[in-house]
Every structure is written in C-alpha cells, then in structure tokens.
Amino acid sequence: MALRIKSPAPPINVGSWLRGRPLTSFQPGKVYIVEFWTTWRRPCVAAIPRLMQLQEKYGDRELEVIGIAVCERTQTPDETRTNLDGWLSKEFPNLNYRIACDDTGNMIKLWMEPSVSRDIPTSFVVDRNGYIAFIGSPTLLDDVLPKVLDGIWHASGDADAHDAEFPRGKPLIVDLDGSLLLTDSLYESFLNVLPLGFQANFAAVRALASGKAALKHHLAQSSELDYATLPYNTRVLDQIQAAKAQGRKVYLATAADAKHAKAIADHLGIFDGWWASDAKTNLSGSLKADILATAFGKYGFDYIGNGPSDFPVWEIADKAHGVGLSKSIRSRLVTLKGSYLALDGGKADRRAWLKALRVHQYTKNLLIFVPPLTAHQFTLANTIADVIAFLAFCSCASAVYIINDLLDLKSDRAHPTKRARPFASGLLQLRTGFLMVPVLLLFSLMLAIAISLEFVDVLVGYFVLTSAYSVYFKRRMLLDVIVLAMLYTTRIVAGGVAAEVPISQWLLIFSIFIFTSLALIKRYVELATRLDCGLPDRSDRDYRIGDLDVVAALVAAAGLNAVTIFALYVASPDVQALYRHPEALWLICPILLYWIARNLMMAHRRLMDDDPVVFVFRDHISAIAIASIVAVVLIAI
C-alpha cells in the first residue's frame, strides 16, 4: 500500500533501540519526525546536529525525533548494533533524541518502500493526529515543522487559507521530464532499447522518419523502465504534496509518451489526471498550452516547468514555477511573468562532474609508468611520452565510465550506493553524457596520435575491450574479472609502447594474477553489500550472494599466485642484470602476502571501498606497504 501525505503513519517496528526509551505507538497530540539514516552517507551524518537542535527547540511543544538506522555495512545484526552504539558514543555523545536500529528490515518495508522517496536520509513528519504530514529531505524541516506544530500544515485537514505559495482551489499542473523527473524519459527509453541489438535500434530509426512523437511512442513501447527507482525531484514532490494537503487538484502534463505518463501517475498515486504525447501528437509547447487553456482557462492554473518549450504554458498560467532554470531562461521568465517560484533542479556542482568523469580512478592509469620504472629506463623522453599516454588513457577511461553509467542506469539505481552516481541520481542530464563521450574520445585520440600509431592501436584496443566489458562481459561470471585484469595489464602495455621500452613477461604474468585478485575483491564487496542490505541477487549478473565464500577463496588463490610469480622472478637470471642486490627483493614477498591477505580481511569486515584499487590509494596501511616495497627496490638497485 502506498504511503503518501494524509496516510496513517505506519507502526514503529524495530529490533532494538540504541538511544532513548522504546516507542510502542504514536501518541495523540504529539508531532514526530521519523528520520531514516545511515552512518556511511555524509548527508545523513550532517543532518544529525540539526535534528538535535530541532528536538531542543521544539521539545516543549511535544516534538519527538526518532532516528532509524538502516542499511549498515555489517555482516550480522549484533555487529550492526555494536558498531552503531560505538559510533554514536564517539560522534554524538550528547544525542538528545531516540535512535533505533532497523536490523530486521521491517521499517524499510513499512515506510521507505511504500513512499515516493527512495533517498537516504529521508524525513517523515507525523502530525498530532497520527497522519503523515510530510515526506522529504531533512533540509526542508525548518520550513515544514513550525507549520505542522502550529496546525496550519497537517494531513487531516485543509491548509491555511492564507498560504501564498498555493492559493486554495487553483489546480497545479506539473511537467515531467526535467521537472518532476531529474531525467528525461526519452533518453531513458533509448538507453533501455540500445542493448537490444541492431534490429530494435533500426526500428527506432524507422520510427523517427514519422516524427518525434512516433519515435517517443516506439521507444516507450519497446522499453521497460523501473518507475519506482527513477530520480524524482523531491522539491517538486514537496510542492505537489503541499497542494494536495490543501485540497487542490494536481495534474501531470508532459511531452513524454502516454505509457510513461500513466505508469508514473499510477506509481505515485498523487495526480488527479494527466495529458501526454501519443504516436501522432507531441504534446509540447503551444499545443500543451492550448490544451490546458481549454481545460482550465487562461490564468486558471499554476504550472511547474523547466525549459524553453514551457514558455507558451507559463505565459497563460497564473503562477510560474521554474525548476533548475538557466540564467537566460530565468531572465526571460521574469520578463514574461514579473516573478516566479524557483525550485531546485538538482544541478550538478564540480564534485558531480569529477565523480562522473571518475577522476579518482585516474590513479589506475599510473600503471602506464611501470614499464620504464621496472626496466630502469626512466629518461626525460620516456617520461614525457608516458605523461601524454597517461592523459590519453584518462580521457578515454572517462568516456567509457560515462558510457558504462548510461547503460547501467537501472542496475545502479537499485544499488544502495551506486544510485548516488551523477547520471543515475539525475544530477547530470543524460543528454550531457551523450555530448561528453565523443568530446573525450576525440581528445584522447589526438593525444594518442601525437605519440605513435602503435600506441593508437593499444588505446583503441583498450577502448574496444572496456566497451565490450560494459556491454557484455561485466554480466558474465568470472569472465568479467578476467577482462578487468586484462584492462589493468593493457595500461602497462600502453606505458611500454609509449616509452618504447620492452615489457618483461614476468611483469605481465604478475599483473594478470594480482589484478584478478583485486577484481574478485570488487565482486566480493558488491555481493557482501547486497547481503547486508537484504537485497536479492542482481538479475543482470551471474553472481549469487551464495557465491560469497567461493569468491573469497578465488581472491586468495589469485593473490597467492601473484606472490609465487614474483618469487620465481626474483630467483630468475633476469633479476641479476637489473639489480646489484637482487636478494633484497625477497623482502617484497612477505609484504605482498600481508597486503593481499589484509585486503581480503578488510573486505570480509565490510571496511573495503566499492573499488579496491581506489581503497589502496586511500588506506594508510596500503600506503606503508607500497612505500616499503619501493624502499626495498631502491636498496636492491
């Protein structure tokens, strides 16, 4: 059953209470904030001090704040409770509100899953009559809570007649793509159809010949979107919920295909009706304005939109609401209407761009410098060539990461942490990704040509292999980790080709085993996360949660084989020509053994990042191990 504004508040059903007395039921006359949070998300942690302030400020007005900890990265409920208790004692020793641990998953099923919001942290406000008065971001509580406490914003009655934002009785019309959704249903449909093969994509091209409406209709009918996990704009949802609480009618009017409009309206359960495009008509711009004018009259409705195509509708609307508008559109809208209500459109900041480009992953491309280092041929010319090669691989890798994110939208949104990625969360628009990919690839190719045609071949091979991984191999058990290991090794090959340095076979064999071990740890962490959060097996991967122990054994086997290969290398005649004290290199073997075993232990304890290679560069113990290996090599030289 859907959980919306005016719904009776579900019960509090938790396994254990960590702070404060257990709450058995909501008491009439009291207002409650039920906050869903987790320790590993910064917005959740940042919200706790503010909730403490709200409890302190409004406690004498019968406010009770309740924090529900969910999706902690631990293996057992006992470990979850122990870790949470220690974390709270350390970080918030003076916590003044109740904290419960949802170690059974009941609260997720009773509250989060039936609600519109899928993000964490999420705040539910329960009014004095036991009804849901608000669902949304805790950052909005400063505005919402005083109204709920004063009785002018509540679920069981009409809103205050003097609320200026939503005059009582006037319908609210909401656009979909870019407004209610932080994404575009057309691009979503296209990306959903793209992996279906040549025949399905050629059919889409044929549909385009009949016009944009026909293309939208064809893609909508051929695609299956997960409407529950699409990124909805919480600010727009808050406006809709406020309007509904005041007894206003709310309608959806969109240029998206009718299939998507109906499915989203049915999923949210908050619209009184909807208009959308069909196979012949593209409901956008002036046509949308004409339909709404016929239905409600000029100035007979308020409208929430986000782009240039909405100007004909804004012109005949009473009040204009703009979502994430650019500076030029804001200026035009002010000229047209005099004023408008600005709503956050989830625009990306610099961190979102860096995350989309995976700048933190560029550390992997440092492998390009390994061949000249291991061959002791680190000259100025080699360094310049490898720096250019490094930049070329970074640009190419960023393009592939974007392709991967675009193709993995559905699975990323179902993942507890990957759903925060810029494209999956709607921080970056999908069309932006389509534009970024060719620009990055062109820049990468230009750099590669500046080095040599042989390096271009390696770079193209890397792009083809990593694209094949994104489209096919990542969904194939064990083939995925082997391909990942090959991609890491390709970086080493590229460094040798760029610097024109011969690559040792020992180095290549060692690389295959060590990177297979790290790739398997990545799969181990993913499976462990799903196990801890009570999620089912992924339908788009061959791995099963029950494979966890087998994957751990393979991690150890591949890692130990890498140490064996290194030991054989130290004992080989090749070492004698490169090192004055080759016997010192034996010290590296126990360091590698410790480091590989520790990585597996950290993953088992749920202390490993999603990407173990990135973890290596953040972990101080790994840094000490790497520094020790470098010191041993210098001694051997």
Image: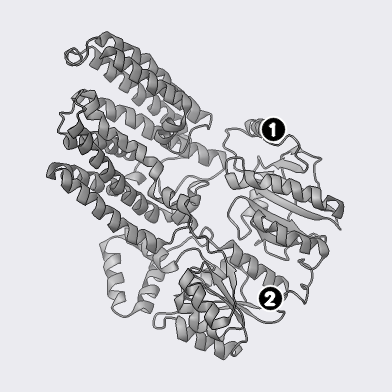
Q: How many marks?
A: 2
Q: Quadrant of residue 630?
A: top left
Name the residue carrying label 2.
166
Q: Which label sits in the foreground, 1 or 2?
A: 2
Which three-letter amino acid code belongs to the residue tagged 2? Phe
- Taking the image as shown, residue 490 lies to the left or right of residue 304, namely left
Q: Looking at the image, is 9 positioned above or below residue 81?
A: below
State whether residue 496 appears in this view: no
Image quadrant occupied by the C terminus: top left
**Secondary structure found at label 1:** helix
What residue is shown with label 1? Answer: 85
| Sequence-earlier tag: 1 or 2 | 1
The reply to whether callout 1 and callout 2 are in contact (CB within 8 Å) is: no
Q: Residues within 10 Å of mark 2 (few under 14, many from 20)?
A: many
**Residue 203 occupies quadrant:** bottom left
Q: Could you say which disc has been placed on residue 353 in the image?
A: none
| Image point (42%, 36%), residue name | 614
Residue positioned 83% across, 50% down in the render: 59
Amino acid under label 1? Asp
Helix, strand, or loop for circle 2?
loop
